[in-house]
Image (tube, helix red, strand yellow):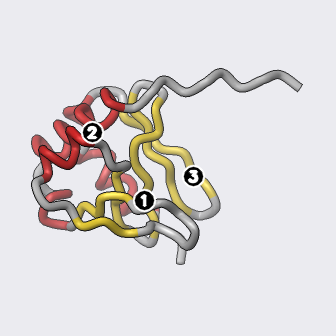
């Protein structure tokens, strides 16, 4: 089931304190980016954040879930945490800071 645009709009609004957060539609779901780094996905109207050591320390005891079949487990961020915009913005910054800068795509 594809995520609804209204869910994505709400999540991006809650993440606004992190800075330039954006999303791209991918196969009916969304990739979420900060500073050019994909740090989260929204699948089936749920937020999944890439696991990092600092993110785990910030969350505490995160639930690890595959956002879709054959995916690596991500941290599942539940509704109550999604509603705390300051907490969510900080998680975005912490996670993106630990991820490497994406490699430039090769020209064909």
Work out whether residue 43 or residue 17 is closer to the camera in this orientation and state it: 43
Pair 1/3: label in front: 1
Which SS class for mark 3? strand
Alpha-carbon span between mark 2 and mark 1: 14 Å
Q: Which residue is mark 3?
A: 25
Q: Is 75 displayed left or right of 73 in the figure?
A: left
Q: Which residue is mark 2?
A: 92
Work out whether residue 87 or residue 75 is closer to the camera in this orientation and state it: 75
Q: Where residue 100 sits in the image (x, y, percent)?
A: 45, 27
User: Which residue of the protein is positioned furthest toward the front in this rendering?
Assistant: 53
Q: Is 98 displayed left or right of 80 in the figure?
A: right
The residue shown at (20%, 33%) is: 17
The residue shown at (31%, 65%) is: 64
Q: Where residue 54 sits in the image (x, y, percent)?
A: 20, 38
Q: Which residue is mark 1?
A: 42
Alpha-carbon span between mark 1 and mark 3: 9 Å
Q: Establish if 47 lies above or below 93.
A: below
- Crowdedness of circle 3 by 10 Å Cα count: few (<14), some, many (20+)? some
The numbered mark, 2 or 1, whose residue comes first in the sequence reads 1
- Crowdedness of circle 2 by 10 Å Cα count: few (<14), some, many (20+)? many
């Amino acid at each position: 089931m594809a995520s609804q645009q209204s869910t994505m709009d709400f999540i991006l609004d809650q993440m606004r304190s992190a800075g330039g957060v954006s999303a791209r539609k991918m196969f009916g779901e969304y990739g979420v980016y900060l500073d050019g780094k994909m740090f989260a996905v929204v699948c089936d109207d749920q937020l999944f954040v890439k696991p990092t050591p600092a993110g785990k320390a910030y969350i505490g005891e995160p639930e690890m879930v595959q956002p879709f079949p054959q995916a690596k487990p991500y941290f599942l961020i539940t509704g109550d945490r999604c509603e705390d915009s300051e907490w969510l913005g900080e998680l975005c910054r912490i996670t993106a800071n630990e991820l490497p800068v994406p490699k430039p795509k090769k020209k064909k």
